[in-house]
Each structure stands twice: as structure tokens, then as C-alpha cells.
Amino acid sequence: MRLRPFFIASAIGVLLLGAGIGIAQIEGGDRGVAPIDSSSDFEVSGVHVDVSAKDADSARYGGWRLAQRKAWVQLSQRLGAGGGLVSDSALDSVVSGIVIGNEQIGPNRYIARLGVLFDRARASAMLGVSNYVSRSAPMVVIPVIWSGGVATVFEQRTPWQEAWARYRTGGSTVDYIRPVGTGPDALLLNYGQTQRPGRGWWRSVLNQYGGSNVLIPTVRLYRQWPGGPIVGVFQARGGPDNRLFGQFALRVSGPGGLAQLLDAGVKRLDDLYQAASRNGLLRSDPGLSYVPPAAAATDVVTPDDSLPVEGVTVATTAISVQFDSPGAGAVNSTEAAMRAVPGVASAATSSLALGGVSVMNVSYGGTPDAFRAALQARGWQVFGSGTTIRIRRAPQLLPPDVAADNVTAG
């Protein structure tokens, strides 16, 4: 039977279309928003300044100077250090960034709403307070936005994902893992996955990201009319069962305030998640812990004393270890600590992110559970399960007779 050229061309077109759809699900060009900042800096936002000077540059520079002073007083009062002011040169050494919320620049005047970031270690030393922050187990964030009756996660870039990428999570007690949204994220972390309570598939997904649980911050946008007010209903959800921890509603007068609406929603959702963590409602799910495969029965062979006994070869396991790397010294010390663990054949950093979270490949002569126990015995906090884990140094508790470092002497 001969096929007409028209039918052949149609069949080829259908095949190419199907292949294109499969590739588009993974290779989407308009997807992926990397988090802007994951550091643990102190942040003071909403500082209003109004400065006049001889020219625009001088007015702006003076406005930033004034913002640093106001923010330092607010930070000092927030941490209970009295609210004293220090010199501008000292502030320059402790300020790590200026965040511009809104600014108006004139020929000789500068009006702005700014945020100021302070280096946590240096600011804590100057204020005489502790810089330790107790964090929860690592939580994978799946931001769901409902708009026009459609739920979107990572299938395309959304303003809700951008709001979570802008939010600085370093000061929160919740350890957020924010996927970028590229690669297989759109297939693994979608709205359908948030509706599946089965722990088995959730365990496989979370192991890819080194998370111990999942958070599902959800927002539903209601537009009163085109170009009119927008109402956002926010829900703090989490866990494989999609549990609701709290909800609230915010409103802006028009589309121009959508980013501000979502930023305020992220901040309040973080407050709800922190409250749930303090109350014990948000924690690691035992059903998501690693389940080792059942050991297969093997025949027991009694060795013959007359035969020479050869060396026993132990199979090694490749384990991916995520660790905090604020600097090159932390990377070198962590690698040395991993090599010092008995049974470790090699340990080398495969993905370096100074100031963030780096990844190290470790070859261990044993099971992942044995490696986890060895790390915990050496004072490490270990999160995750299987061959993908995240480690952090356990907090050093002070003896009862030693005062904390936030108590001034004299």
C-alpha cells in the first residue's frame, strides 16, 4: 500500500509536535528565577529619608548616610542593645548593602524609602549580642499562584516566584530551599504533586533537593476589573498532606502595586511558618525519612582453614553532602572534617557557592545511615536522607555557670 505525500507529511508533523511538547516541558526559556540573597544579614527595611544638597549625587549620598544611621538605631533597639549611634566609618564597615524600595531624585533633593543590610557577625560583635539563629529542618518551597482560574508553579515565570526569590530568608528561623525553576523542576514540583499525600513519591522528590519537608505557600489573585484593584488571598500550607497553617487577605488599588502586594504576602507567610515551627506544628515528617531496602538473604559459607583468606573488598557509596560555605576557609575545613571520618575514601567539593550552600561528593565505605551516624557522633546536624544530605554544625551550648555573650560585663 502506498502512502500519499500528504499523509506522510502529516505524520511527521504530529511526531515533531509531540517531541516539541516534551522538550518544552523541560527546556522552557521563560522559566527560572534564582534567589537574590540567601545570606543571614540583618535587614532593616522601610527607612524614609528626605535630604537636600548642592547637587543630586550629594543628596543621594547623604540620603544613604542618613538611612544607615536610622537603620542602625532601629536594629540596636530591636536587639535590645539600647539604640546607641556609632560613627559613619564604623557603619561603613558593617553595612553590607542598601536596598532601594522607592526613590525620587531631583536637582538638589533626594526622597527615598530604603532598606539597609548589616553583616550579622560584625553587627553582633559591635552590639554585644549573639549572632546564632536556630533554624528548622530544610524545607522545599513550592510557590503556587492561582490567577484566572489556573494554578501555576514553575511551568513559567510568575510574579509569585519572583517575590519568593526577592525575599531574604537569612533572618528567618525556617530553613527555606527555594528551587530555581529550571531543568526538571516543572515536572517534579507542580500543582498536581502538592495534591498527592503518598509519602513514597514525596520522599523521592525531596531527596533530589535535600529537603526534610515541603512548604506550599499559595496565593489566589482576584482582579475586580481590568486595571482595577487586586485582592490576594494568601495561605500558608505545608507537608505532604497540604496542611493549612493560616491565611489572610491583602488588597492593592491597581496592577502597579502587585509586586508590593506579593512582597508583603511573603513576609506575613514567613511569620506564619515561623509561628508554626515554634509551636511544633511544622517539623520533619517521619513518613519522609529514608527507608533502607530490605536485606536479601544470602547463603552462609564457612571458610576453609586450609585455604588462604584474601582481603575483603568493601563497596563504597557516593554521597552528596550540602554544607554552608561562607568563605574559602569554611570549604577547606569542611572537606578536612569529612576526610577525617573513618570509612571516607575521598571528599571533594563539586559545586562551590561562596556565601551560600556548596555541594561535596563523598565516597564512603558503608551505608548512608552509617555515614549519617558517624557525622552526628562528631557534632554535626544532618538533614535529609539517603545519598543526599545537608549538614550543619550543631550549636554549642554554654555551661550553666557561663554567661551568654549578649550580657554586658560590669
Image (cartoon, rainbow, N blue to C red):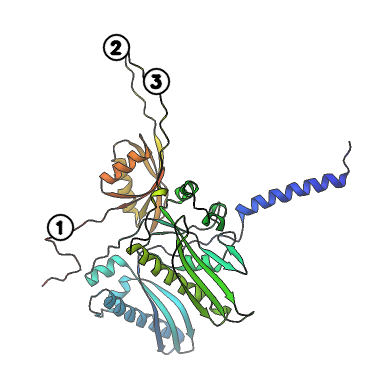
Q: Residue at x 41, y 48 (%)?
A: 287
Lateral position of residue 84 relative to residue 261, left or right: left
Residue farthest along the top direction in this orientation: 306
State the mark number for residue 299.
3
Q: Nearer the viewer, residue 319 or 270?
A: 270
Q: Secondary structure at mark 3?
A: loop
Q: Residue at x 62, y 53 (%)?
A: 25
State the mark number for residue 69.
none
Q: Amino acid at mark 2?
A: Asp
Q: Which residue is mark 1?
A: 399
Q: Position of residue 247 (x, y in %)?
A: 46, 70
Earlier in the chain: of badge 1 and badge 3, it is: 3
| Callouts 1 and 3 close, C-beta under 8 Å | no
Position above or below: 280 against 230: above
Q: Position of residue 265 (x, y in %)?
A: 47, 72
- Distance from Cα at disc 1 to Cα at disc 2: 56 Å
Q: Which residue is mark 2?
A: 305
| Callouts 1 and 2 close, C-beta under 8 Å | no
Q: Nearer the viewer, residue 107 or 343?
A: 343
The 10 Å Cα crowd at callout 3, few under 14, some 14 to 19, many 20 or more, is few
Earlier in the chain: of badge 1 and badge 2, it is: 2
Judged by depth in the image, the label closer to the viewer, 3 or 2, is 3
Judged by depth in the image, the label closer to the viewer, 1 or 3, is 3
The 10 Å Cα crowd at callout 1, few under 14, some 14 to 19, many 20 or more, is few
Position above or below: 200 against 153: above
Which image quadrant: the N terminus?
top right
Q: Residue at x 33, y 15 (%)?
A: 303
